[in-house]
Image (tube, coloured by chain):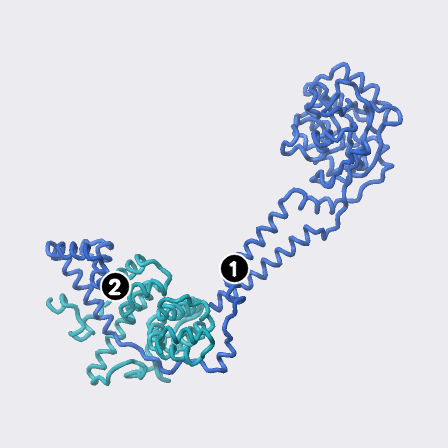
Chain colours: A blue, B cyan
Amino acid sequence: MNGLSLKEYEKFSAYLDGELPAAEARQLEEQIKAHPEWRLAIEELSATRDLLRRAPRYRAPRNFTISPEVARQYARKGWLPSFISFRLSAAVAALAMVAALVLQILPGAGLASRVAMAPAAAPQAELQAMPTSSAVEKTMDTQAAGQPQASAPAESAGEATPPPVILWGDNSGVISNMGVARGMGGGGGGCEPGQPGCDVPGGGIVTYNNEKVGSPMQGGAADTIAPAPSGGGIVTYNGVPPDRNVVGEGSYIPPMTLPAGSAAGPSSSPESQPTATPEAARSAAEAESANPILGFARGDQAGQIIAQAPITQAPTAAAVEVAPSAGVREVHAAAQPFWSPTRIAQVGLVGLALLALVAALLLRRRG
Amino acid sequence: MDEIALVQSARKGDLDAFNRLVLAYQDMAYNLAVRMLSDTDIAQDVTQTAFLSAYRSLDSFRGGSFKAWVMRMVTNACYDELRRRQRHPTTPLEPVDEDDEEIESPHWMAGDDPTPEEALERRELDRAVQRCLEGLEEDFRAVVVMIDLEGMDYLEVSASLHKPLGTIKSRLARARLKLRDCLHRFWELLPSAFRLESERNA
């Protein structure tokens, strides 16, 4: 390039075509006088351009006019075909795929389908049997080792019959504050309401920390852990708890103890167990007579079973409804079919995306 | 009838008006296609396709230079063909007969009844230019063909290729530089009239 930069050649090229602004053209002409190599470079570019201009032109060997027959065949594009262009089709495809993914991720959407695919709930009669299975022991071990709450139900759910969901007290704030997940989660994690990972309904053990009012399920002591009945039921409790167990808006969470058949947890790892208060121990002793839920069941108010909640490997609080007027929580695990509205919408969106993709490719090919 | 009126009539469905526009630009369109594709037969198909696309897309013409708009149709059709060609082998520029011998003085080349010597010189120049154009990238080739071989101005090319004016200038300068270097290899084959001044003085 004779030491000249591409920028200077761009200037020379535009100068040759008269596309350089007048001021720049005058400045360039002055520079050409001082730089003979610039003049040579411009001359070579000019000669190349002249050579190209002298190259023969090709004439059309025939007319490319359009006959009426062809014109009818290639009918003019209307508004719709021009509107549904390649770009629009591509955009539709992208949006549809994003919408389908969002539906999958949204809480309750994909989860609902998982609940729907869960096994049927166990009969309510199974709730009478206390869980002495390995699931409970596993949960206890996990809790003693300081594992997060959610891991315990995940393990137990994989091996044993899904345990029930147990709700205590008569205040709707219990569910909302504690969350069904923490109530059933084995008690170890110290989850706060709304904390991620704490809203997973768990493996059938309800724990209660009576040391800290307002933070139920936090740091549950081993001797206040009550295994839930097997069979995947939901139990509500309307008992009147001691004053120290006040939770939220007057709702109460009674301390619970393990049944005799499942005492492996507390004794196996005492160093990791928080100390229970004397009140809690006394309450737990009183509650042992109230199966399946051990707590402050007061006669006819204890342990009303209202629904079965199948808990899957990824248990959720899906389809939980609270009926405040009844004074008893009603928890429903809605058994949705595989073709739920969400699933249908997802499949429809994916189908739309595929159609738009095909349309985009066809339009692209046609140009 | 001027071009604007023809375009208006064509948009209203007047096929004759559109065909008059086709006749006005078909040589330019075909020449562009031949220079871009180096194949006269395929250039015919591409030119016809481009005019059909133009007819079907007349409603999308928003005014401005109709020549630039039509050339955009041709350029797009050429790009499509080049993409298709990448998946399939191509064919040479020179028309050949049944024995693969190059046809002398092809009838499709424009000329004003030149003498045999002039025709020979033009053929040599055409071959050299086409060989060098083939060595350019498609985007550079389109710019230099439209400006130096078709005589379009920068703005028309900018509108045709949907590129900023600065991009057109840059591409043109690069293309001219590459063509200058390439054509140096053909100097001795070209008649002295086509050689560069510096070469003649050397």
| Residue A176 in the image: above or below residue B201 | above
Mark seen at residue A66: none
Instruction: Place residue B145 in its image quadrant.
Output: bottom left
Depth-wise, is mark 2 or mark 1 nearer the camera?
1
Residue A108, position as x, y percentages in the image: 68, 43
State the image coordinates of residue A279 (x, y, percent, origin top left). 77, 15
> Between residues B152 and B185, which one lies in front from this camera angle?
B152
Question: Vertically, is A65 above or below B131?
Answer: below
Read off the chain for label 2: B
Asked whether A206 or B135 is in front, the reply is: A206
* Number of marks in picture: 2
Where is residue B36 drawn, in percent x and y?
35, 70
Q: Inspect this view and state whether residue A229 appears.
A: no
Q: Mark 1, chain letter?
A: A
Report the residue marked by disc 2: B176
Amino acid type, label 2: Arg
Residue A139 occupies which quadrant of the picture?
top right
Q: Is residue B116 left or right of residue A313?
A: left
Identify the residue under disc 1: A88
For the point 79% across and 32% down, the residue is A133
Instruction: Residue A24: give x, y in percent of width and height.
Output: 19, 55
Q: Is residue B6 positioned above or below A28 on the image? A: below
What's the amino acid at mark 1?
A: Leu
Neighbour tally class for label 2: few under 14, some 14-19, many 20 plus, Cα within 10 Å: many
Residue lying farthest top? A278
How would you rate the neighbour count of disc 1 (Cα within 10 Å): few for under 14, some for 14-19, many for 20 or more? some
Give the spatial CA distance, label 2 vs label 1.
38 Å
Q: Classify mark 1: helix, strand or loop.
A: helix
* Callout 2 secondary element: helix
